[in-house]
Amino acid sequence: MLNRIIIGLIGIPTGFLILYYRARLKDWIGNIYFAEKYLGRGGTWEILPLIGLGISILSFLYMIGSLQKIFFSLFGKFF
């Protein structure tokens, strides 16, 4: 239980930091090839906010235990 809270408390701000500092992050990592290829010109600028939001949302769901319930309801029959 405590590890889920810690991961959530680290993951949620990390996602928001990606959103806030996406210009510096893009300058640091450069263009993301598959994003530029499939999303068109400026695809890196589109994928970075999606990654940040995804990290924040998934961290929150993991912290409250909903991610496990969703995962096992979808993929539980395979395990």
Image (tube, rainbow, N blue to C red):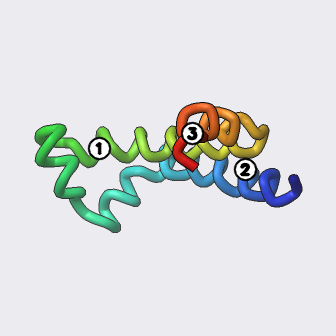
- In the picture, measured across the screen, residue 40 lies left or right of residue 69, that is left
* Amino acid at the residue labelled 2: Gly
Nearer the N terminus, badge 2 or badge 1? 2
Q: Which residue is mark 3?
A: 77
Q: Determine which quarter of the picture holds residue 38.
A: top left
Q: Nearer the viewer, residue 4 or 44?
A: 4
* Residue 10 vertical placement versus 38 (above, below): below
Front label number (3 vs 1): 3
Q: What SS does tag 3 mark?
A: helix
The residue carrying pointer 2 sits among few (fewer than 14), some (14 to 19) or many (20 or more) residues within 10 Å by Cα, namely many
* Amino acid at the residue labelled 1: Trp
The residue carrying pointer 3 sits among few (fewer than 14), some (14 to 19) or many (20 or more) residues within 10 Å by Cα, namely few
Residue at left 12%, top 41%?
Answer: 41
- In the picture, measured across the screen, residue 63 lies left or right of residue 26, that is right
- In the picture, measured across the screen, residue 42 lies left or right of residue 6, that is left
Q: Which residue is mark 2?
A: 8
Q: Which residue is mark 1?
A: 45
Give the spatial CA distance, label 3 vs label 2. Answer: 27 Å
Front label number (3 vs 2): 3
